[in-house]
C-alpha cells in the first residue's frame, strides 16, 4: 500500500523507503532521489510463487520464526533430496528486477531446469547442509530501530542432480518485512 511521506503512520504500519520504478521493476530516471517515495508495509513473512519438483518432490521454504528486530529469523527448507547434499540460500532486495539479468521471476529453462523460477535478485548467498530431506537458514536480526519496515527476499536453490539436466531445483521465494 503506497502513501505519501507526509501521510502519517496509518494503521500502525511502518514506512519503507523504495525507489520508484516502472511496471517491470526497473528503476526510473537517472537521479534515483527524484523517484523516492515511502511505502507502508505491515510486518510479516509470506511466500512468493512455488518451487519446481525435484527427486524428493516439491522443495518448500517456510518461516519458522518471525522477522523480528533483535531476534533470530529462521527459514526451514523441506522436501530436499534424501541423499543429503546442500542448498544455497539466496538473499536479495528485489522481487521485480535482477540487475544484469532482467525482470523477475526469471525462468531457468535455458539452463536445463524447466519450470524453475528465480524469485529474488541473489545479492547474498550462503551454502547450507541438507540434513536428510530438510535444512534451515537463520539470521540474527539486529535491534536497530532504523531497520523496522525493511524488506528483503529469500529463496533456496537445491542441489539435486537427478531432478533435471541443470542438477538444481528451487523453492518458493519469500518476502520478509522486519518488525
Image (cartoon, helix red, strand yellow):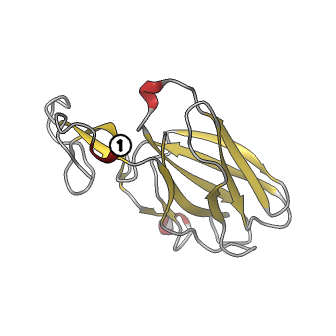
Name which quarter of the figure residue 164 lies in: bottom right
Q: Secondary structure at mark 1?
A: helix
Q: Residue furthest front?
A: 11
Residue 110 appears left or right of 130:
left
Circle 1 Cα neighbour tier, 10 Å, few/some/many (<14 / 14–19 / ≥20)? few
- Between 126 and 172, the residue placed more toward the observer is 172
Instruction: Tell me the residue at 19%/51% (across/down).
Output: 22
The residue that mark 1 highlights is: 12
Taking the image as shown, residue 23 lies to the left or right of residue 96, namely: left
Coordinates of residue 93 in the picture (x, y in percent): 43, 42
- Seen at 53% across and 69% down, the residue is 50
Residue 75 lies left or right of residue 34; in this view the side is right
Q: Is 16 situated above or below 25? A: above
Front position in the image: 42 or 154: 42
User: Looking at the picture, how far across and down is residue 6, in whole percent?
Assistant: 16, 34
The count of marks equals 1
In the rendered image, which quarter is residue 10 located in? top left
> Which image quarter: residue 62?
bottom right
* Relative depth, front residue between 51 and 48: 48
Q: Position of residue 70 (x, y in %)?
A: 60, 30
Q: Looking at the image, which residue is at 30% across and 44% down?
A: 40
Give the camera-side residue of 125 and 17.
Answer: 17
On the image, the x and y values in percent for residue 65 come to: 64, 49
Amino acid at each position: 500500500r503506497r502513501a505519501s511521506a507526509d501521510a502519517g503512520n496509518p494503521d500502525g504500519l511502518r514506512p519503507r523507503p523504495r525507489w520508484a520504478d516502472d511496471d517491470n521493476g526497473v528503476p526510473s530516471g537517472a537521479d534515483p532521489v527524484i523517484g523516492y517515495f515511502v511505502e507502508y508495509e505491515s510486518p510479516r513473512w509470506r511466500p512468493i510463487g512455488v518451487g519446481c519438483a525435484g527427486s524428493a518432490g516439491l522443495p518448500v521454504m517456510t518461516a519458522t520464526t518471525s522477522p523480528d528486530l533483535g531476534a533470530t529469523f529462521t527459514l526451514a527448507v523441506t522436501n530436499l533430496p534424501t541423499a543429503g547434499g546442500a542448498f544455497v540460500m539466496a538473499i536479495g532486495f528485489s522481487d521485480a528486477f535482477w540487475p544484469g539479468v532482467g525482470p523477475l521471476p526469471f525462468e531457468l529453462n535455458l539452463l536445463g531446469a524447466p519450470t524453475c523460477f528465480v524469485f529474488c535478485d541473489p545479492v547474498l548467498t550462503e551454502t547450507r547442509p541438507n540434513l536428510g530431506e530438510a535444512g534451515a537458514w537463520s539470521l540474527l536480526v539486529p535491534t536497530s530501530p532504523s531497520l523496522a519496515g525493511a524488506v528483503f527476499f529469500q529463496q533456496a536453490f537445491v542441489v539435486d542432480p537427478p531432478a533435471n539436466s541443470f542438477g538444481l531445483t528451487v523453492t518458493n521465494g519469500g518476502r520478509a518485512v522486519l518488525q
